[in-house]
């Protein structure tokens, strides 16, 4: 099979939904900016792009109408480029990377853009037109009921079942904020960010969710967010976020022939299902599958990007997988940076490849939990 590689990565700044700097920016415009940036920065020939595969968790309204096709046209790509929108909730744009890699492996193209977008300012809780299946709401099979469980409740369930204390969650959240703030101050995030210009001419070129002043004492003083006598707070949860990201996936032969900078090879991928009421543990079986397919162990990993949907699930997954904390979310995770649902998978996969290249490591893992009870993982190898 043809080897797929990551040869480019770019994202917009991430900002708080409903109150952040990107409130007035349409998601299709954000997605177009990320696509254009990854094309321009990589130097790929636009006429060689087979398809743009766009992850989006709630593809309705301004991020509907097959937002992938709309965004690529807004980005100035030629009409010859295809576009498809893919939905696996939080894992949507990592799944886009997997589809691109699989297409390359089977000879169905050499150049793909795997992207993702979510304007959580534009979506109502549960989506624009929630219409739960009555079987899920009338009792009966418990598994049906769990499929629509609140994500906050799943975080509390994981904390209970895997014995993750509030202090454990707050330590991870504090560390995430400190790492992200340090990376931002050192300019380590700038290479991946494409500035956005607002209607009034204001340029947004930095993330807006990072709270550099976070303290353990401050986190300890926050109210519980989801359950009386629980452990999860707003400070140990990823914020509602607006943003977009894009990854260039090509065959290794194409990248070398055209002088593209290869960040990493895609070594293995995996999907796994888990009980919906503990969806946050999804990274564990997915990562175990991917590592086994890659023929390596957790101890071999030099870089790990695990999405911090909640502190409880991130801590539990790190422990269960036996990950070295020093390798995890080196420049901060979603609790600090934000989690625009459809964009996160592309961000953490592209970021893992970028970090692998930056640190000189050999193997990287990117992994996420997914609402509804799934996990997704990607193993990368230095080129």
Image (cartoon, rainbow, N blue to C red):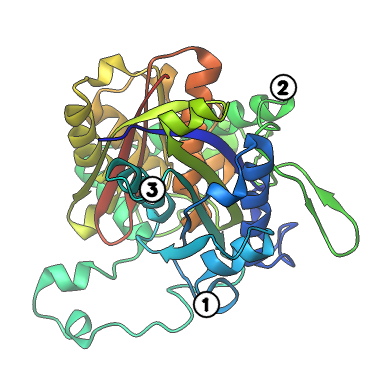
Sooner in the amino-acid sequence: mark 1 or mark 3: 1
Sooner in the amino-acid sequence: mark 1 or mark 2: 1
> Looking at the rendered structure, which numbered label has been put on residue 100?
3
Q: Secondary structure at mark 3?
A: helix
Between tags 2 and 3, which lies in front? 3
Q: Residue furthest left?
A: 141
Q: From the viewer's perspective, tell me whether residue 196 is left or right of residue 53.
A: right
**What residue did someone put label 2 on?**
186
User: Does any portion of residue 328 appear in the rendered image?
Assistant: yes
User: Does any portion of residue 237 appear in the rendered image?
Assistant: no
Q: Are marks 1 and 2 in contact (CB under 8 Å)?
A: no
Real-space CA distance between mark 2 and mark 3, rounded to the nearest whole angstrom: 33 Å
Residue 240 image position (x, y, % from top left): 55, 58
Real-space CA distance between mark 1 and mark 2, rounded to the nearest whole angstrom: 39 Å
Q: From the viewer's perspective, tell me whether residue 197 is left or right of residue 79.
A: right
Against 186, is 34 above or below?
below
Residue drawn at point x = 65 percent, y = 26 percent = 183
Against 318, is 275 above or below?
below
Give the quarter of the image for residue 145: bottom left
Residue in front for this viewpoint, 268 or 336? 268
Instruction: Rate crowding at label 2 as few (under 14), some (14 to 19) or many (20 or more) other CA atoms within 10 Å.
Output: few
Real-space CA distance between mark 1 and mark 3, rounded to the nearest whole angstrom: 21 Å
Q: Are marks 1 and 3 in contact (CB under 8 Å)?
A: no
Q: Secondary structure at mark 1?
A: loop
> Looking at the rendered structure, which numbered label has been put on residue 65?
1
- Count the numbered circles shown: 3
Q: Secondary structure at mark 2?
A: loop
Quarter the C terminus occupies: top left
Residue 375 image position (x, y, % from top left): 27, 48
Residue 329 image position (x, y, % from top left): 47, 29
């Amino acid at each position: 099979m043809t080897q797929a590689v990551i040869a480019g990565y770019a994202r917009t700044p991430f900002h708080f939904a409903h109150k952040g700097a990107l409130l007035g920016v349409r998601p299709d415009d954000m997605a177009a900016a990320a696509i254009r940036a990854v094309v321009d920065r990589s130097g790929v020939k636009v006429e060689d792009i087979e398809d743009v595969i766009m992850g989006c968790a709630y593809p309705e309204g301004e991020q509907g109408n097959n937002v992938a096709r709309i965004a690529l046209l807004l980005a100035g790509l030629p009409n010859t480029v295809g576009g498809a929108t893919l939905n696996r909730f939080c894992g949507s744009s990592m799944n886009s990377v997997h589809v691109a890699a699989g297409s390359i492996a089977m000879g169905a193209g050499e150049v793909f853009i795997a992207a993702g977008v979510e304007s959580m300012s534009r979506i109502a809780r549960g989506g624009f037109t929630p219409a739960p299946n009555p079987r899920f709401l009338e009792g009966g099979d418990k598994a049906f009921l769990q499929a629509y469980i609140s994500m906050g409740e799943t975080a509390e369930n994981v904390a209970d079942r895997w014995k993750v204390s509030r202090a454990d969650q707050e330590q991870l959240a504090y560390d995430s904020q400190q790492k992200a703030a340090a990376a931002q101050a050192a300019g380590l995030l700038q290479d991946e960010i494409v500035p956005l210009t607002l209607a009034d001419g204001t340029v947004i070129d930095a993330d807006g969710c990072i709270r550099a002043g976070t303290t353990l004492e401050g986190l300890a003083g926050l109210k519980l967010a989801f359950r009386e006598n629980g452990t999860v707070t707003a400070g140990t949860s990823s914020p509602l976020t607006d943003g977009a990201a894009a990854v260039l996936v090509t065959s290794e032969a194409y990248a070398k022939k055209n002088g593209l900078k290869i960040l990493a090879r895609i070594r293995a991928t995996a999907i796994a299902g888990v009980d919906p009421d503990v969806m946050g543990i999804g990274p564990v079986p997915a990562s175990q599958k991917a590592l086994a397919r890659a023929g390596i162990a957790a101890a071999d990993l030099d870089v790990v990007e695990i999405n911090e949907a909640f502190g409880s699930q991130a801590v539990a997954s790190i422990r269960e997988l036996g990950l070295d904390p020093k390798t995890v979310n080196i420049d901060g995770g979603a609790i600090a940076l934000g989690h625009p649902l459809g964009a996160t998978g592309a961000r953490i996969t592209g970021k893992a490849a970028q970090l692998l290249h930056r640190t000189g490591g050999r193997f990287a893992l990117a992994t996420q939990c997914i609402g509804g009870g799934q996990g997704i993982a990607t193993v990368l190898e230095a080129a």
